[in-house]
Image (spheres, coloured by chain):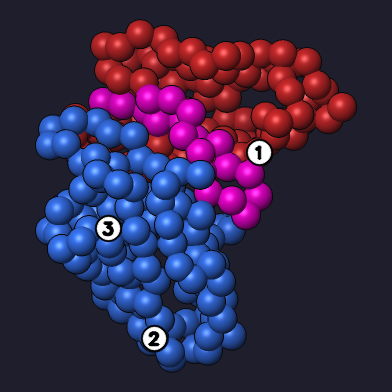
Chain colours: A blue, B red
Amino acid sequence: DSGVTQTPKHLITATGQRVTLRCSPRSGDLSVYWYQQSLDQGLQFLIQYYNGEERAKGNILERFSAQQFPDLHSELNLSSLELGDSALYFCASSPGLAESTDTQYFGPGTRLTVL
Amino acid sequence: QQPVQSPQAVILREGEDAVINCSSSKALYSVHWYRQKHGEAPVFLMILLKGGEQKGHEKISASFNEKKQQSSLYLTASQLSYSGTYFCGTERIQGAQKLVFGQGTRLTINP
């Protein structure tokens, strides 16, 4: 158990819908990262937040957005869902110390299925 | 740019050794190794930093060749529990914290 929690564990929805995935980082960690893992794309970095501010952006679609709240939990919002958005979405957290290389600890993931 | 892992898959018998490589065309600051079992979260194994020493963890160790921008993960006397997909994540700049992962190497250990 990494200490990172994600809800829900599974999500089944229809094309065109909007969903919200939630992540609570390990106690004391300030950075939260979101990754998408699909069969043909591997682990793709989406976005990072540090202490409430967006810090780095990866291959995140405009239909996707994220935020980190004052209590440091984060939410990933996916809208206008398409079949190709079906994937495992992981959240990871790290202490987020500036200018250092942190270990990222991954949560159990949310499996999103778009029908 | 995504690092390239080799081999893509390997099948071993319990007790055999394996080497997994991770290569980048760009200069790297750090390489992070993870193991993931099917349907589960990636589990952190170790980090190798530019200028750092070879790391070890029980029978799993790794090295980082800065000149070649290549890291290798060594699994010796493999156990059934070592089965899974191994990913390397690379960081190009110190503190960037944004990892770019390779496509993974699937390791199967048979009794």
Along the line of sight, which residue is nearer the eye, A97 or B93?
A97
Main secondary-structure element of the magenta-colored stretch: strand
- The percent coordinates of residue B10 (x first, y second) are 71, 31
Q: Which residue is mark 1?
A: B84
Kindly indicate whether the residues beneath marks 1 and 2 are on one polypeptide chain. Answer: no
Mark 1 is on which residue type?
A: Gly
**Identity of the residue drawn at 66% across and 13% down:** B76
Secondary structure under the numbered disc 1 in the rendered image? strand
**Three-letter residue code for mark 3:** Ile
- How far apart marks 2 and 3 lie (CA) works out to 18 Å
Residue identified by numbered label 2: A18
Q: Earlier in the sequence, mark 2 or mark 3?
A: 2
- At mark 3, the secondary structure is strand
Residue A80 coordinates in the image, percent (x, y): 38, 87
Residue extending farthest to the top is B53
From the viewer's side, name the closer residue of B66 and A14.
A14
Please identify the quarter of the rendering in which residue A74 is found.
Answer: bottom left
Residue contact at pointers 2 and 3, CB within 8 angstroms: no
Q: Position of residue B8 (x, y in %)?
A: 63, 37
In the picture of the structure, the residue carrying the numbered disc 3 is A47
Q: The magenta stretch spans which residues? A: B29-47
Q: Chain of mark 3?
A: A
